[in-house]
Image (spheres, rainbow, N blue to C red):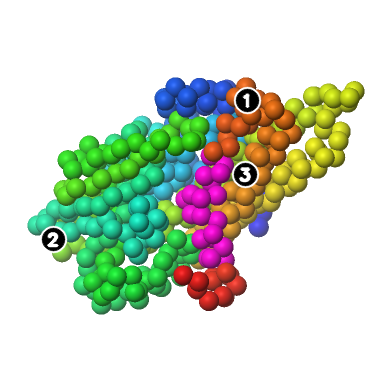
Amino acid sequence: MDFDPTPEQRQLRDAVRALGRRYGHDYFVAKAKAGEHTTELWDEAGQLGYLGVNIPAEYGGGGGGITELAIVCEELAAAGCPLLLLVVSPAIAGTVIGRHGTEAQRQTFLPGLADGSLKIAFAITEPEAGSNFHRLGTTARRDGADWVLSGRKCFISGVDEAPYVLVVARVADDSANDSANNSANDSANGSADAGPPSGAGGPAAERLRPALFLVPTDAPGLTRSKLEMEIVSPENQWLLYLDEVRLPADALVGGTAEPGDRGGLDAGLPALFAGLNPERITVAAMGAGTGRYAIERASTYTATRRVWGRPVGAHQGVSHPLAHAAVQVELARLMIAKAATLYDAGRDVEAGVAANLAKYASAEAAALAVDTAIQVHGGNGMTTDYGVATLLGAVRAGRIAPVSREMILNFVAQRVLNQPKSY
């Protein structure tokens, strides 16, 4: 593995860092508390080409990979501006459409994702199933040439900002090999969310396979309600209700309007995993950037805050916890780099393992860094002005979403340590 970034990657990191610092954490918090979005930052990042670094050049993107997008996520977060929709729109939707969409879908959606003029939300999580796609209750059925979707989704980010949402549903399919194919793909792609491929509701349930649909957020039958969250963020969370939402045939990712076309159905699992591993990597990058931001704020404070005639950072009881947090963040960054490198090299099995490890390491490191930063600030750490307590809710949520630390530990126990399945 080459630990030296390319000149282009170095330039990208420097440029994104400069952009993020021009806006800064005060801007981020002000937008969040006003109930507004970080529109100015998003638009400028799009105009500069940072939002589309992973989109193929022929569709207006930078032609890079998840490595480059992870750099963008990390550096904006390190400037105090973690943008969750970077994970949702270019990382998940951009990758899924780029890899598994039809040519018409790529031409329609990728240019807007690349320049930031289009945002696409992502909806997999459900109240009863979590992210276990084997137990999803949202279903799609054919009605003539159309698809009809029904179900519920929860914790869906940014639906109020996006004209489309990429919905994961289950489609009835009588293929005799579906259950075996599902299980094989789970193993190959390394999902920490995957539940049992069989026994999840009987034979009929086993014939339901995942598929992804591009659903307009103003489609008749699609309604939403806002989830009030204890997180300082300009991006909102939503409950979605799909009540007989009718879609044209080509709303299926990878599908066309041609009679008998099965491309979108056959691409369902690969398309889903094509988005989930970049999601983990970019969430991890955002967490590492947040950890860096917290440590930088804390280190500046402890080096200059004087008590008893010397800086408080001169006391090992203050400096050692900060140093420990800094070590954990740097270790997480190494795992993120490995996961992104493997993913961009097309080594999907290894990338699935590394992406889950990176997400776990980063979430733990970010939570530790923010908690330590608050502690070394003393009472000042709980004020808005010092800019660290405002991150507490987000880093705590990072240990839960998009996949919980416990499910990653299950994954490592089963897939890395060859232990029996515990659920």
Where residue 392 appears, as percent x and y from the top left, is 58, 37
> Which residue occupies 60% across, 72% down?
417
SS category of the residue bearing label 3: helix
Q: Quadrant of residue 20?
A: top right
SS category of the residue bearing label 1: loop
Q: In the image shown, does 172 or 254 lie closer to the viewer?
A: 172
Q: Would you place residue 408 above or below residue 95 in this image?
A: below
Disc number at residue 383? 1
Q: Please report whichever mark, 1 or 2, sits nearer to the chain's N-terminal start.
A: 2
* Residue 108 as seen in the image, left or right of residue 325: left
Q: Is residue 402 magenta?
A: yes
Q: Would you say the residues marked 1 and 2 are in contact, meaning their CB atoms lie under 8 Å apart?
A: no
Q: In the image shown, does 401 or 121 lie closer to the viewer?
A: 401
Q: Please report whichever mark, 1 or 3, sits nearer to the chain's N-terminal start.
A: 3
Q: Quadrant of residue 268?
A: bottom left
Where residue 16 appears, as percent x and y from the top left, is 56, 32
Q: CA distance from mark 2 to mark 3?
A: 51 Å
- As drawn, the residue found furthest toward the front would be 379
Q: Is residue 7 magenta?
A: no
Numbered range of the magenta stretch:
394-412
